[in-house]
Image (tube, rainbow, N blue to C red):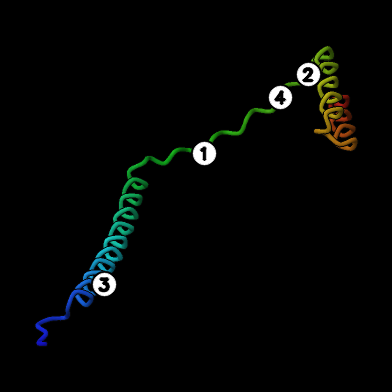
């Protein structure tokens, strides 16, 4: 029997190697293109200034202090504030 080529299995193996190499190269090219597009988009977007900090709150009238104390007490009852946190915030409200 005289063979003329690599045969069916050899051709299939060669095709698999070529397809795998093409897939790997294609994946790397796609990754590089995505990185370039991301860099271009970042360069095109204007730099936005940092947000300004909120202005400090004005002094609270006496009636509102009671409302704030009630809200602090509710937060303490819900377990959101610890006893120490509650006392610190209460002292701040009463001092200010």
Residue topped by disc 4: 57
Horizontal side of 14 relative to 4 (left or right) equals right
Q: Nearer the viewer, residue 57 or 74?
A: 74
What is the distance, in whole Å, between disc 4 and disc 1 at their CAs?
21 Å
> Which circle's residue, 3 or 4, is located before the other in the chain?
3
- Image quadrant for the N terminus? bottom left
Which residue is outermost to the bottom?
A: 1
- Where is residue 84 shown, x and y percent of the image? 89, 37
Disc number lying in front (3 or 4): 3
- Residue located at (31% from left, 50% from top): 37
What is the distance, in whole Å, between disc 3 and disc 4 at their CAs?
69 Å
- SS type, badge 1: loop
Pointers 1 and 3 in contact (CB under 8 A)?
A: no
- Where is residue 75 shown, x and y percent of the image? 81, 27
Q: Is residue 49 above or below residue 76?
A: below
Residue 50, numbered circle:
1
> Which circle's residue, 2 or 1, is located before the other in the chain?
1
Disc number lying in front (2 or 3): 3
Horizontal side of 6 relative to 46 (left or right) equals left
Q: Nearer the viewer, residue 22 or 28?
A: 22
Q: Quadrant of residue 92?
A: top right
Residue topped by disc 2: 60
Residue 17, numbered circle:
3
């Amino acid at each position: 029997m005289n063979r003329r080529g690599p045969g069916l299995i050899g051709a299939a193996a060669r095709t698999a190697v070529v397809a795998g190499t093409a897939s790997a190269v294609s994946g790397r090219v796609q990754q590089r293109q995505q990185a370039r597009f991301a860099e271009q988009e970042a360069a095109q977007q204007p730099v936005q200034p940092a947000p300004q900090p909120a202005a400090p709150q004005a002094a609270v009238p006496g009636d509102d202090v009671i409302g704030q104390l009630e809200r602090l007490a509710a937060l303490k009852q819900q377990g959101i504030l610890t006893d120490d946190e509650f006392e610190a915030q209460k002292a701040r409200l009463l001092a200010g």
